[in-house]
Image (tube, coloured by chain):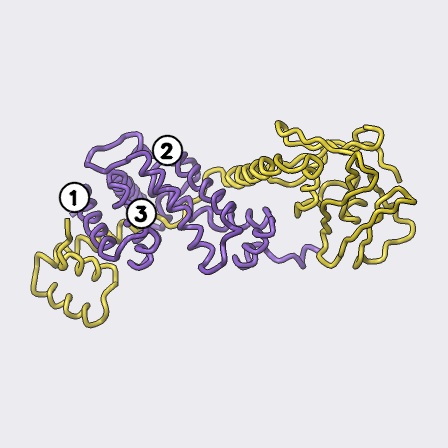
Chain colours: A yellow, B purple
């Protein structure tokens, strides 16, 4: 059904979509046509009541839960996407998370380093798949030393570390991610559990367990 | 880092937060969710008239936005872009459910289960009697809107709640300007008809 142009005029006037000349002409029509004036008044009243009773912003019930559910959904989707990639790479995603620095003091030294290393069996060389430094001023690079049978991390841009500061490193041989509980277990060279980490409801890393570190 | 040097999340521009989101920062996205969840939820609630479904749809809109963020080029405001996603999510849902406002009440949709603390009526300093009348009018208006077709409900929400100009409505739906005007006209006529008793009793 095609709307007559005069009806368009009425709502264009009501919604302030007319230019000055059009508005003047329509006002003259309103003055001369009581029926049109009554219709316009009723529509104007309706519009005012709609605006008063349909707030543009409403408090979201259980707002915190609303947010955390979104974070959980995002984390679950990322986990699903990562399931297709290499198993060893999955746990490294933790180090891309912006909240990693809050895990705990147990891994504080690792946070300072900003990286962890994954040795990919069966090759002898370590492979750094990903690095993350909480500070953008810190550049991370690495190389494998066959003599030391170790991967060396180079951190450029760090402030001086006091000589008596203990730096803790973990030798990670492999990792396993349990999708059901969204937890990743990191194993050392003797197959011992070194760390177990998970994401909390807000998608932040949470340390579930840690073995004694090697100082 | 001292707390005083960290910017208040409320002061960080959307564009900065969007860029951080595009780099995978879910905390930045959380700030955006906090910033706009009330407006997005209001839109889905007005369109759906059911708190639980509106809550789910608002959340779905944010999830879709997160997925689409890598392709967002900041060629419009984040809210405009987000609103269109939320609008499409809600409208698709309405169409799938084939909710039609053919003049029959659907009790399941007009029975408002508003959570404690939720504000469905604006606050004011009116007397209790006036507040009660306003609340009744609000209920009647929401009942009437629930009886509109999705197309008519959509233009009413875009125009009266969001205050969009016709061209913005046409771009959001999308449709022609003529269609926007026709739908607005008939939606208002329908509401007038549905609220006739309310207005007659009030005068």
Q: Residues within 10 Å of mark 1 (few under 14, many from 20)?
A: few
Question: To which residue does mark 1 refer?
Answer: B193
Mark 1 or mark 2, which has the lower sequence index? 2
Circles 1, 2 touching at the beta carbon (< 8 Å): no
Question: SS at mark 1?
Answer: helix
Residue A137 image offset from top left, x and y in percent: 73, 59
Question: To which residue does mark 2 refer?
Answer: B113
Please tell me if label 3 and label 1 are on a single chain.
Answer: no
> Which is nearer the eye, B68 or A111?
B68
Q: Give above or below for B176 relative to B120.
A: below
Residue B186 image offset from top left, x and y in percent: 19, 48
Disc 1 is attached to a residue of which chain? B
Residue A53 is marked as: 3
Residue B151 image offset from top left, x and y in percent: 27, 45
Q: Give above or below for B3 relative to B128.
A: below
Disc 3 is attached to a residue of which chain? A
> Which is nearer the eye, B51 or A99?
A99
- Seen at 35% across and 53% down, the residue is B172
> Which is nearer the eye, A91 or A212?
A91
- Give the residue furthest to the bottom: A21
- Marks 1 and 2 sit apart, C-alpha to C-alpha, by 25 Å
């Amino acid at each position: 059904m095609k709307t007559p142009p005069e009806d368009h005029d009425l709502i264009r006037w009501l919604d302030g979509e007319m230019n000055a000349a059009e508005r003047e002409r329509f006002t003259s029509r309103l003055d001369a046509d009581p029926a049109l004036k009554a219709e316009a008044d009723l529509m104007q009243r309706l519009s005012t009541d709609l605006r008063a009773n349909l707030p543009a912003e409403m408090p979201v019930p259980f707002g915190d839960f609303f947010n955390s559910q979104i974070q959980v959904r995002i984390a679950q989707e990322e986990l699903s996407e990562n399931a297709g990639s290499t198993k060893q790479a999955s746990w490294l995603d933790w180090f891309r998370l912006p909240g990693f620095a809050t895990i705990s003091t147990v891994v504080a030294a690792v946070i300072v380093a900003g990286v962890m290393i994954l040795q990919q069996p069966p090759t002898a060389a370590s492979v750094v798949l990903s690095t993350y430094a909480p500070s953008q001023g810190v550049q991370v690079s690495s190389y494998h030393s066959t003599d030391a049978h170790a991967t060396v991390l180079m951190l450029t841009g760090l402030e001086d570390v006091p000589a008596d500061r203990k730096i803790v490193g973990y030798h990670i041989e492999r990792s396993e991610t349990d999708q059901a509980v969204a937890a990743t277990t990191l194993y050392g060279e003797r197959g011992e559990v070194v760390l177990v980490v998970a994401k909390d409801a807000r998608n932040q890393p949470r340390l579930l367990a840690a073995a004694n570190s090697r100082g | 880092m001292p707390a005083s040097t960290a910017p208040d999340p409320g002061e960080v521009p959307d564009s900065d937060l969007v860029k951080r989101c595009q780099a995978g920062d879910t905390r930045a996205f959380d700030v955006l969710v906090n910033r706009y969840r009330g407006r997005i939820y209001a839109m889905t609630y007005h369109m759906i008239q059911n708190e639980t479904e509106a809550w789910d749809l608002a959340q779905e809109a944010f999830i879709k936005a997160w997925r689409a963020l890598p392709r967002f080029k900041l060629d419009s405001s984040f809210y405009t872009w987000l609103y269109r996603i939320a609008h499409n999510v809600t409208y698709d849902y309405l169409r799938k459910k084939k909710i039609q406002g053919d003049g029959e009440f659907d009790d399941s949709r007009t029975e408002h289960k508003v959570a404690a603390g939720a504000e469905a009526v604006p606050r004011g300093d009116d007397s209790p009697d006036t507040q009660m009348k306003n609340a009744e009018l609000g209920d009647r208006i929401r009942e009437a809107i629930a009886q509109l077709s999705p197309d008519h409900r959509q233009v009413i929400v875009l125009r009266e709640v969001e205050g969009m100009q016709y061209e913005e409505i046409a771009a959001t739906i999308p449709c022609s300007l003529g269609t926007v005007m026709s739908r607005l006209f008939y939606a208002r006529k329908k509401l007038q008809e549905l609220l006739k008793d309310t207005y007659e009793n009030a005068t």
